[in-house]
Image (cartoon, rainbow, N blue to C red):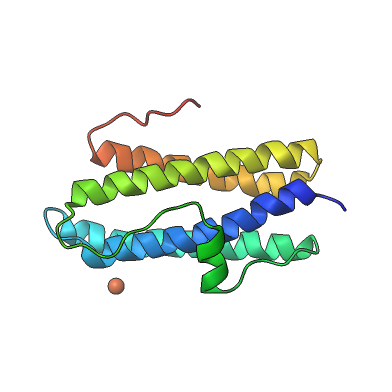
Amino acid sequence: MKYEKTKVVLNQLVADLSQLAMVVHQTHWYMRGTNFLKLHPLMDDWMDDLNDQLDEISERLIALDGSPYSTLSEMVEHTKITDEPGNWDRTIKERLEILSKDYRYLADLYQQGIEVSDEEKDFSTQDIFIGFKTATEKRLWMIQAELGKAPERDL
Ligand SMILES: [Fe+2]
């Protein structure tokens, strides 16, 4: 079968983007503290971006004759992004640190996708992965900057 490894990464992304959108939604709901007024609406924009990526990734998988996960239980079964029940005691800084870790995982998964799609010569999917990796790294830079840190990324 063609593009098998690329399709595995695409479906992994389906599960992880779904899960990350939920983590960002939790951040949106459960944040309390300085910068709430700015960060609360910002999380809406980030969720929109993740959902746009999810749709494009899923539809690319379908275009390759694949079948994206499409139930919450499948997302839970396959995602590698961890979660925790809502907790009012977490600070905004802690929530941003969680997002930094999760967005870094996502950027690394896009990198993995770039490499396997290269190997399989699926350059159309690779183009999608490259664009989303770039966007994810920009987001990582901003989260890290808010935390007073360097991007800490080998580009
Ligand atoms: Fe809201």
Residue reaching furthest to the left: 33
Give the residue at the far top of this rendering. 154
* Quadrant of the displayed image that contains ligand 1: bottom left
Question: 6 left or right of 100?
Answer: right
The answer to which image quadrant residue 89 occupies is bottom left
Query: Looking at the picture, how far across and down is residue 100, in whole percent?
Result: 35, 43
Q: Quadrant of residue 57?
A: bottom right
Q: Residue at x 35, y 49 (%)?
A: 99
Q: Provide residue 145's location: percent of width, then percent of height.
A: 28, 37
In this rendered view, identify the residue nearer to me: 143 or 98. 98
* Residue 15 visible in the shown view: yes
Query: Image check: 105 left or right of 95?
Result: right
* Residue situated furthest right in the rendering: 1
Q: Residue at x 43, y 29 (%)?
A: 153
Q: Position of residue 84 (x, y in %)?
A: 32, 59
Residue 45 visible here = no
Q: Is residue 100 left or right of residue 123?
A: left
The residue depicted at 36 percent of the width and 31 percent of the height is 151
Q: How many marks?
A: 0
Compare residues 92 and 82 and report the one nearer the observer: 82
Picture residue at 55% right of the left edge, 48% below the top: 132
Residue 82 percent location from the top left of the image: 41, 54
